[in-house]
Amino acid sequence: AEAVRKGAGIPTRAVGLIDDPKQAEAILGDGRADMVALARAFLADPRWGWRAAASFGEEIRPAPQLARSVTTMQHWMKAAG
């Protein structure tokens, strides 16, 4: 993605083996790609985005429809560290 971005000057997306939030942030922050695509990470953990936000100290505010699973989510988040 980085070579295409520099050579063609078009928006690029980094894909493949990106499963850590800090790795994804570094790719974007270093300007190596404009977007990061995650597939396996979300298939393995549908709440990957929530965990990523928590790893950066962001408050997680689930939609009201998910209130019944918040206790379970908090348990998973705590277990994930």
Image (spheres, rainbow, N blue to C red):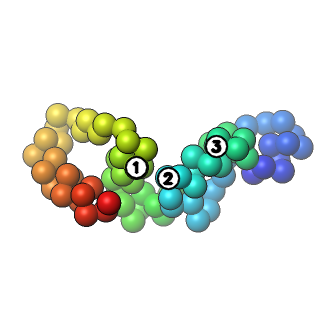
Three-letter amino acid code at the position of disc 3: Leu
- Name the image quarter holding residue 43: bottom left
User: In the image, residue 27 lies at what x, y percent?
Assistant: 65, 49
Task: Report the amino acid beneath label 2.
Answer: Pro
- Please name which of the two marks, 2 or 1, marks the residue nearer to the observer: 1
Q: Check disc 3 and report its element: helix, strand or loop.
A: helix
Which residue matches tag 3? 28
Q: Earlier in the sequence, mark 2 or mark 3?
A: 2
Which quadrant is the C terminus positioned in?
bottom left
Q: Residue at x 80, y 43 (%)?
A: 5
**Three-letter code, disc 1:** Ser
Residue 58 picture quarter: top left
Estimate the x, y position of residue 44 in percent, counting from the top left: 39, 65
Q: Nearer the viewer, residue 78 or 31?
A: 78
Residue 49 visible in image: no
Residue ID at (10%, 46%): 68
Please tell me how crowded label 1 is: few (under 14), some (14-19), or many (20+) other residues with Cα within 10 Å: some
Residue 26 image offset from top left, x and y in percent: 62, 48
Mark 2 and 1 residues: CB-CB less than 8 Å, in contact? yes
* Residue 55: numbered disc: 1
Q: Which residue in the rendered view is the most extreme toward the right?
A: 7
Residue 70 visible? The answer is: yes
Label 3 vs label 1, nearer the camera: 1
Please report whichever mark, 3 or 1, sits nearer to the chain's N-terminal start. Answer: 3
Vertical comparison of 81 with 30: above or below? below
| Residue ID at (82%, 47%) | 4
Query: Could you tell which of marks 2 and 1 lies nearer the N-terminus?
Result: 2
Which mark is on residue 21? 2
Q: CA distance from mark 3 to mark 1?
A: 16 Å
The Cα atoms of the two marked residues, 2 and 1, are separated by: 8 Å
Q: Secondary structure at mark 1?
A: helix
